[in-house]
Image: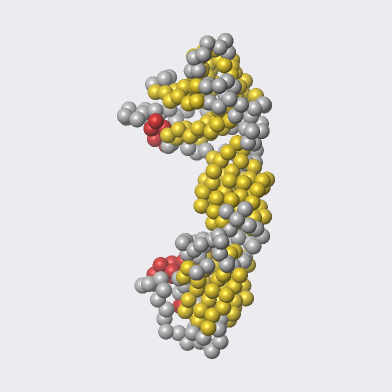
Amino acid sequence: MKFSSNTKFPLLLLLLVICSFTSCESDFDVEEIKGGSEPPVITSVSEAREDNPVTQGVLENTYIIRGKNFSSLTEIWFNGVRASFNPALTQDDLTFTSVPRNAPYVGQENTLRLVNLHGETTYDFSLLTIEDFTEATTTEGIKTVTLIGGDFSETSKVTFVSGTAEDGNLVESEAEILSVSETQVTVKVPDGIEQAYIYLETARGAVAQSESYGFSYSIFIDALNPDWEMSQWGGTFDVENTDPALGQYSIASYREGWSGLTFLSTTNIPYSDYQALTVSLYGTVEGQLVNIALNDFAASVQVKLIKGQWTKYVIPLRDWYPTGGAPALITRIDFQEATNTALPQYIFYVDDFGFL
């Protein structure tokens, strides 16, 4: 499936349909209508934007229901929650509706129910949504994402999509699916992903999209951002370390006590453009501590590393300046060894580093 803005269904008509759901005096107002003398019959349901037949719907998306005896239609229900529709846009063989945001999507009988003046009918139709996702790293250093929501039972494909076709930088990277349940899907993050939207596709034809995954601005993911330079004091470093690494490379930092690794920006990085600093660190001794300092130690935050394990840290930028005084620009970031146990050398590893 191509994730683009091209549509087969006329966009103007789709906008008219969507607007019609909000223009009624009441969500469930039904005009006095005339029709045949038979209950409704559903023959198919299609996603409205591209008119693709589906047997699963995404919460809040708009769908075309086809069949017959819709002229006297009065009610549409998804898993027991009533949906709005506009009789003025309903024909005897076609109607439009949107799946309610509050419709339940797991542990249900998965029924779409239509009611007209002469009876009702049900249709096998499950619901899909991605509510959230979590990130983790396995003991082997594999980055994973777990999508949370449902009904994921018939998941067939998960794709990380970045860029756009219009800008000529569209990249679609299929992820390896590690596990699937009704409410969770865990996948391996494809190599090289910095920022992307995650699309989950099911065998029933539905496609749900996550919120943005990854960085608003990356400093190091497999390679140093060319707008940054590196320096240090009291040790050495390697930007092409392969073990341990979350992708192809991490940064190995070999440090004397209280020495540090420095990142220097060669361009303007406005403090106000970002909410948090995120980085993954790998410790090599028990109780290992690292100070993360901004702008030549104008402010610092201390983190505790875990021996033999990657830990992802997401630190709000306000933690460096809890009482105010934040700078206009971020010009320098230091990682200072702070364990203070008199060892001749401390080693830690840095990966997946940037701003959110």
Instruction: Say left or right for 173 vs 64.
Output: right
Residue found at x 60% / y 60% = 206
Considering only vertical position in the picture, is 219 above or below 343?
below
Give percent across and percent down for residue 270. Answer: 41, 32
* Residue at position x 47%, y 61% in the image: 101
Is residue 201 or residue 182 the one in the foreground? 182
**Could you tell me residue 339's position as x and y percent?**
50, 17
On the question of residue 172 being in view, the answer is no
Q: What residue appears at the point 42 percent right and 34 percent down from the top-left corner? A: 316
- Quadrant in which the N terminus is drawn: bottom right
Q: Name the residue: 42% across, 84% down.
A: 32
Give the vertical position of 167 relative to 286 (above or below): below
Residue 307: x %, y % from top left: 58, 25
Q: Is residue 281 visible?
A: yes
Q: Is residue 125 above or below residue 280?
A: below
Viewer-side residue, 40 vs 274: 40
| Residue 303 appears left or right of 154 | left
Question: Which of the 4 quarters of the picture holds residue 69?
Answer: bottom right
